[in-house]
Image (cartoon, grey):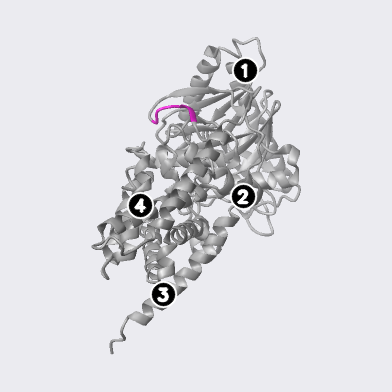
Amino acid sequence: MLYLPGPTFNLWFFAFVALVPVVIVAVNGSATWKRPVYLAFFAFYLVSLQGLRHAHPLMIFPVLAMAAYLAVYPLVFIGMLRNVASHATGKRYLAIIAAVLWVGGEWVRNYFATGISVLMLGHSLAGMSHPTLIQIADCFGTYGVSFMIVIVNVAIADLVMWRSSESGNESNAWKFSVPLALLVLLATHGYGVSAINVPTVPSETRFLLIGRDEQTEYQQDLQREMAIFSAYTMQTITAVNEADAPIDVIVWPESMLSGGRPWYIAEENMVVPDDFSNSADSPSVTSAELREMITQTQADFVSRNQDLLGAISADKSTRAPSIIGGCGIVKYGERAMQFSGVIDVGPDGRVRNTYAKNHLVMFGEYIPLIKSIPILKNFVPPGLGLDAGHEPAIFEIGETRVMPNLCIETAVERIAVDQMRTIWRRDPDSIPDVIVTLTNDAWFDHTAVVEHHLRCAQMVAIGCRRPILSSANGGPTAWIDSSGRLIDKLPLDSVGEITAQPQIDDRLSLYVRYGSLPAMLMAFTWGWGLVSWRRAAKKTVPIIP
């Protein structure tokens, strides 16, 4: 039943009964509940995320590990709930306690081991055509939607257990949980109606989102990268010249603007890396020579941009557009660092700003601590030794302020929210108008993983109250408004483009202001509940000599 609200079937209403069996097992289940419950949830996560295996043959092992890890949380949830339900007071207020424990567990998994937000319970309602019940995400994030769903599930479970008891009076918990669930549903819906109807202002900036379905490989040669760059170039030229109005900015997906040429940066404190030296005492390249080489590569990069923009605007009387595109970034400072990044190219072809991806994909872009192990660091394959950026960025496109995100960052909900908060605290007048996310989901071969990624982006749009424009290769090229609604979307396996002139929403959400503070407090309760459950379990297990 948890699978049915997902993108495969989109039967979102099943979310309100999917946990009913879980609650019944917690209250009335037999002593042998652990293995079947764990296997059921392991199967759910494995089937839902199996598309990750397409990225690389060895990815099957991380997928199995991820499913095994995520299935622990429902197991722990039931264990804690059984402990609570063993007390009369706990059984009576089970609805609130269950919601607190479930959300507390979601908060933990959103932070532990770098965090993952995909397949949170609240995402099961992202497919609603009239998404009034998910608008509370601007107050509490997806956690708030999960909280509401759990309360409704417990209320229905209480009714089922009450109706199925022999006397009909075994438990009166439903007298508390059912009115609570109705109140929460009505309040959530009422808030959602008012939140969706808040007026917005049309942006003056027209975005052209380019989407393709180019097959990618873990290690691509230069010829293949150039072929992909050429395909995007030809499509963009055609799209801009066929547009019914001038385009202000073109958006290319993750990595597609590199074309075999990363953007090199030389910092003031640049040190020549050991790779450029014959020995410690005899450098083959001096600092001045390396700086000159970087200056030349930058000039070549700008020249290529100018050729591209010249071809795009050749048949237009208007000025050339800007480009926001995914591109590798190599920075030489005290040490050489390479980033997966986004660059902002102005109409003159010059790079105006850059963004270095803040949240890397574990095992896909880095392996924890491997660079600190002298024997192993030399065996890191290209692309697996990336560095992480630490700051958000703002791209000024005319009068529109754009915050870039990259790849998995919209699938880890806190990233965009924390970046918005950082920008707001530094300068409230510079808060972004639009979030542009670039991704390459061709790795996942059109599986449900791509749609789960899109649902994460929908919830981020609500949480930040900003429209999200997603440009993807083999993935969700989509225009999402600040209420999480899909305004336009390309099929996953298609070649096409979306022209978007998003509505500007000037609300500063509570979620951006205060973050996930309520969920964090619930996480402390989750930790206390886990300790209490394990202590209770030890008391009931006999010691066998």
SS for callout 4: helix
Q: Amino acid at mark 1?
A: Gly
Instruction: Report the mark closest to the observer, 3 or 4.
Output: 4
Disc 2 crowd, CA 10 A, few/some/many (<14, 14-19, 20+): some
Give the residue displayed 49% in from the left and 50% down from the top: 361
Q: Amino acid at mark 4?
A: Ile
Disc 3: which residue: 534
Specify the farthest residue to the bottom.
545
Disc 1: which residue: 310
Counting residues from the start of the chain, the first of labels 3 and 2 encountered is 2
* Magenta part of the chain: 486-492
Q: Is residue 15 magenta?
A: no
182, above or below 74, in the image = above
Counting residues from the start of the chain, the first of labels 1 and 2 encountered is 1
Side of 180 relative to 33 (left or right): right
Question: Residue 337 got which mark?
Answer: 2
Spatial CA span between label 2 and label 4: 54 Å
SS for callout 2: strand
Disc 4: which residue: 156
Side of 165 relative to 65 (left or right): left
Counting residues from the start of the chain, the first of labels 1 and 4 encountered is 4
Counting residues from the start of the chain, the first of labels 2 and 4 encountered is 4
